[in-house]
Amino acid sequence: MLTSSMIKEAALAAGADLCGIGSMDRFDNTPDYFNPQFLFPEAKSVICLAFRIPRGVQRGIEEGTQFFQYPSMAYGGTNQMFGPAVLYELGRMIEDEGYEAFVYRNTGARSIVSDMDGKLGQTYSPEEKAFSMDSSGNGITGDRRTMPHTRPSREGNIPPDLFIHFRLCAVACGIGEIGWSKMLLTPEFGPMQRVVFLFTDAELEPDPLYNGPKLCRMCLKCARECPGGCISTDKTKSITVNVGGKECTWGEIDVWRCNTYYTAGGKAYNPFVPAQVFDDNADFLESTTEMTPENEIAAARAFEAYTPSWVGYAMAKCGGCIRACVSVLERPGGCMEGRFKEPLRTGKPWKLDR
Ligand code: SF4
Ligand code: SF4
């Protein structure tokens, strides 16, 4: 008989760092467009595999010397290589036992709702194809954050492709909780992991939802060190959702502003772009109002010549919230205390003086 411990042993042996298992009824209150119960209605269990982000891929950004290892090795690497390879192995093992393995890796931007802000309708992927679009997003297909013309394949279905909420699914599998920064935090790796999933009709013993010591210290360092001011520093401005009975709360985030700052950075945090470009676009980059799609496209156009993304995943210019969080969680009492012989941060973080 296929058991949870067999699954976990196989997942870790194949290369996952963590494996958690949830029951599908934990998604009973999930909004339809994100609800994995529609994916495979006979599924009884969901398996989450987490892959650590090696702390060393952040070292170059922390030092201001090399920016591409995080998006290529950790972000793209787990989405495109390490995660799918392990999912495939685990899926084979489950199907050899006579159960179906619906493997689910991160494909992003393939749904009727935006994978950025969860909204219905047409949203853009400005970092990919800003030059090809007018301000309404017309001009190209396939390079947006949504598939706005998709429709249900039969009555009662959700328009494909259904894109699940990865971080909340990971919570449903018991591997951790959501921090103020909206990052998934686990006791083992803090904010430093990425996840993939497998849905199966095998009825497996679920893990409890994470109920250990609070992982997020509510220090708001992630918010204070965000170069775009994208995460609220006001503890009363938060979002709370319920996942299978566990309340998850995070700070309000301007996700589109995060997209811009992640890919283009701020004037003081992007050594690849002349200061003048930031000054020329300061009216929307430094505005405190919510980023609009028009501003997004303008930002992408302004920066495209300096930081091409067609070589692969957009080069990370900040990762400020992750590094800030690690630097807090490695301190005494944090869940990453003692994990490394030396801390990630050994001095004051760099900042361009311009
Ligand atoms: S990824 Fe960068 S821009 Fe986005 S919230 Fe984190 S620190 Fe801010
Ligand atoms: S930096 Fe502090 S507030 Fe932000 S997620 Fe990490 S522990 Fe929570």
Image: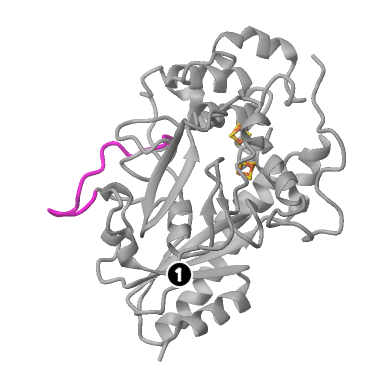
Residue at x 19% of width, y 53% of height: 153
Residue 321 image-quadrant placement = top right
Q: Is residue 145 magenta?
A: yes
The magenta span reads 143-158
326 horizontally vs 212: left or right: right
Count of marks, rendered view = 1
Q: Is residue 148 above or below residue 247?
A: above
Residue 139 image-quadrant placement = top left
Residue at x 35% of width, y 81% of height: 99
Residue at x 26% of width, y 38% of height: 149
207 horizontally vs 27: left or right: right
Q: Is residue 200 above or below residue 150?
A: below
Q: Is residue 36 magenta?
A: no
Residue 172 visible in rendering: yes
**Which residue corresponds to mark 1?**
208
Which amino acid lies under the numbered mark 1 shown in the image of this protein? Pro
Residue 265 is situated, as x and y percent measured from the top left of the image, at 66, 27
Residue at x 26% of width, y 71% of height: 42
Residue 291 is situated, as x and y percent measured from the top left of the image, at 48, 21
